[in-house]
Amino acid sequence: MNKIVGIVPAFVVGCAVAAFGGQGGDINKDRRDVKKDVKEAANDRKELKTDRKDIAKDKAEIKDDLKEGNKAEAAKDARELKKDERDRRHDARDVRKDARDVKHDAKDLRNDRRHGVR
């Protein structure tokens, strides 16, 4: 009986430490996550801007090639356009994902601050 009385409080304390003890670095982790996500979003927006410029350039090149009657070069530029459009879609998806991550991590950070987690 004495062993059980000694084990139960130790078990309860162990569970409490496991549940709440790991939150000490939680606010710092959330802060780093927000900074990282904001930086990634900025980089993805730059890539998206570059992709849009590349797409406009490819379209202009295709138009010029077709005017000159150079179908082979127009086909090559069309393949490049398709690749650039695929890159743009991928980067746009990344921007949306990063925005979602920033929103989630910022909310988590606010909740940690509100509840006194340090």
Image (tube, rainbow, N blue to C red):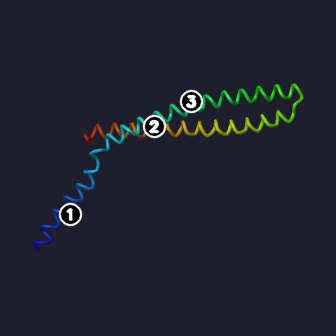
Residue 3's disc is: none
Q: In which quarter of the image is residue 9?
A: bottom left
Q: Which of marks 3 and 1 is in front?
A: 3
Circle 1 is placed at which residue position? Answer: 11
Q: Report, in whole angstroms, how far the alpha carbon at label 3 lies from the one at label 1.
A: 52 Å
Looking at the image, residue 4 sits to the left or right of residue 92; the answer is: left
Three-letter code, disc 2: Asp
Three-letter code, disc 1: Phe
- Residue 71: x %, y % from top left: 87, 34
In the picture, the quarter occupied by the C terminus is top left
- Residue 39: x %, y % from top left: 47, 33
Circle 2 is placed at which residue position? Answer: 37
Query: Which residue is at a point 81% across and 27% down the rendered structure image?
Result: 63
Query: Which residue is at a point 20% across and 60% down the rendered structure image?
Result: 12
Is disc 2 placed on a helix, strand or loop? helix
Is disc 1 placed on a helix, strand or loop? helix
Residue 46's disc is: 3
Three-letter code, disc 3: Lys
- Residue 68: x %, y % from top left: 88, 26
